[in-house]
Image (cartoon, rainbow, N blue to C red):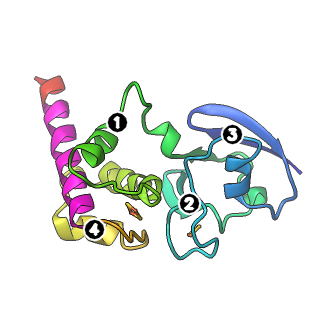
Amino acid sequence: MKVALKVNGVQRHVDMAPLARLLDALRGPLGLTGAKEGCGEGECGTCAVLLDGVPVNACLVPIGQCDGREVVSVEGLGSIEHLAPLQACMAEHGGAQCGICTPGMLIAAEALLRRNSDPTANEVRTAIAGNLCRCTGYERIVQSILHAAYDLRSSDKGAAE
Ligand code: FES
Ligand code: FES
């Protein structure tokens, strides 16, 4: 099946079986290995991407359901040269240790901050509830996301003045 989808703002095409997983399309023909395979069963969140702005576990999404839709993977948030505030805060405040959960955490946090620019710590914890981390104890991740939210609000305010 030929599938046309926008990935990180660029129109792309893949030709795969309709039940092939979005995760395999990303990591295979689309060449984007940021989304990781942890459990492969929808339990860990390390494969998370935004599909039409909604966080989904790419290991559970058939590519056949992605035709005409828009995917944002962690590569779409920023780059090594230009880290997004979420990425910079995760690095600066110790939110990433081994890094396996980090792409999914960033996607969950991005989805949260798009709809709520000033979340509470509990709202952050709820937003990342589907993302497992075995290294950090979560608190540094929560603090990193709160710092990023603050930085984004400050830069928006600065831009408006
Ligand atoms: Fe998709 Fe774990 S690999 S949720
Ligand atoms: Fe290692 Fe989260 S930093 S699993």
Pick the front one: 55 or 25? 25
Q: As shown in the figure, which amino acid type bears the numbered disc 4?
A: Tyr
**Residue at the spot x=34%, y=67% of the render?**
135
Q: CA gap, disc 2 to disc 4? A: 18 Å
| 148 within the magenta span | yes
- Mark 2 vs ligand 1: CB under 8 Å? yes
Q: Which residue is mark 3?
A: 31
Q: Where does residue 86 sit, x and y in percent of width and height?
A: 31, 44
Q: Position of residue 130 (x, y in %)?
A: 43, 72
Q: Secondary structure at mark 2?
A: loop
**Kind of residue at badge 3:** Gly
**Residue 114 picture location, percent across and down:** 34, 49
Q: Quadrant of the C terminus?
A: top left
- Could you tell which of marks 3 and 2 lies nearer the N-terminus? 3
**Residue 86 lies in the magenta-colored region:** no
Task: Give the secondary structure at mark 3.
Answer: loop
Q: Give SS at disc 4.
A: loop
Q: Quadrant of residue 99?
A: bottom left
Camera-near label (3 vs 1) is: 3
Q: Residue visible at 22% across and 39% down?
A: 152
Magenta-tinted stretch:
137-157
Neighbour tally class for label 1: few under 14, some 14-19, many 20 plus, Cα within 10 Å = some
Q: Which numbered disc flags the more N-terminal residue, 1 or 4?
A: 1
User: Quadrant holding ligand 2?
Assistant: bottom left
What residue is shown with label 2?
47
Residue type at tag 2: Cys
Report crowding for label 2: few under 14, some 14 to 19, many 20 or more residues within 10 A (C-alpha): many
The residue beneath circle 4 is 138
Q: Between 58 and 134, which is closer to the camera in this rendering?
A: 134
